[in-house]
């Protein structure tokens, strides 16, 4: 998966819990939980949806790595072929 596909995937997954979010207006380096007001359950749902949709497991120790748009994109591209 490339960067564009990973970003599109993030947008799709976020749309489930935050349909009003426009990723183009979000700072890619800002924590998603603060920037778009995701609570901890929404974040866990995002990580679970990533597994269910793309088969990418994110262990709890890696949660900080996927907590921003840039981090999410980097993580997804690094964990797909």
Image (cartoon, rainbow, N blue to C red):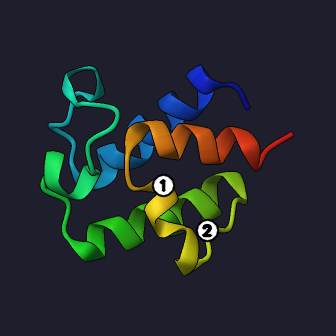
Residue 44 x/y as whole percent: 39, 73
Query: Element under label 1?
Result: helix
Q: Is residue 64 left or right of residue 55?
A: left
Q: Marks 1/2: CA distance?
A: 8 Å
Mark number for residue 66?
1
Farthest right residue in view: 81
Marks 1,2: beta carbons within 8 A:
yes
Q: Is residue 70 left or right of residue 50?
A: left
**Which of these two is toward me, 72 or 18?**
72
Relative to residue 41, is residue 19 depicted above or below? above
Residue displayed at 69% across by 59% down: 56
Residue 41 x/y as whole percent: 28, 76
Residue displayed at 73% across by 32% down: 1
Residue displayed at 62% across by 54% down: 53
Q: How many marks?
A: 2
Name the residue beneath numbered marker 2: 58
Query: Element under label 2?
Result: loop
Of labels 1 and 2, earlier in sequence is 2
Mark number for residue 56?
none
Q: In this view, does 46 lie to the left or right of 3?
A: left
**Picture quarter containing residue 19?**
top left
Is residue 69 visible in the rendered structure shown here? yes
Quadrant showing the C terminus: top right
Residue 14 x/y as whole percent: 34, 47
Residues packed near mark 1 inside 10 Å, few (<14), some (14 to 19) or many (20 plus)? many
């Amino acid at each position: 998966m490339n960067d564009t596909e990973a970003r599109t995937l993030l947008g799709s997954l976020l749309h489930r819990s935050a349909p009003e979010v426009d990723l183009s207006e979000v700072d890619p380096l800002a924590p998603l939980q603060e920037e778009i007001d995701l609570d901890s359950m929404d974040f866990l749902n995002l990580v679970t949806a990533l597994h269910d949709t793309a088969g990418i497991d994110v262990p709890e120790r890696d949660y900080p790595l996927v907590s921003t748009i840039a981090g999410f994109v980097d993580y997804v591209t690094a964990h797909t072929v």
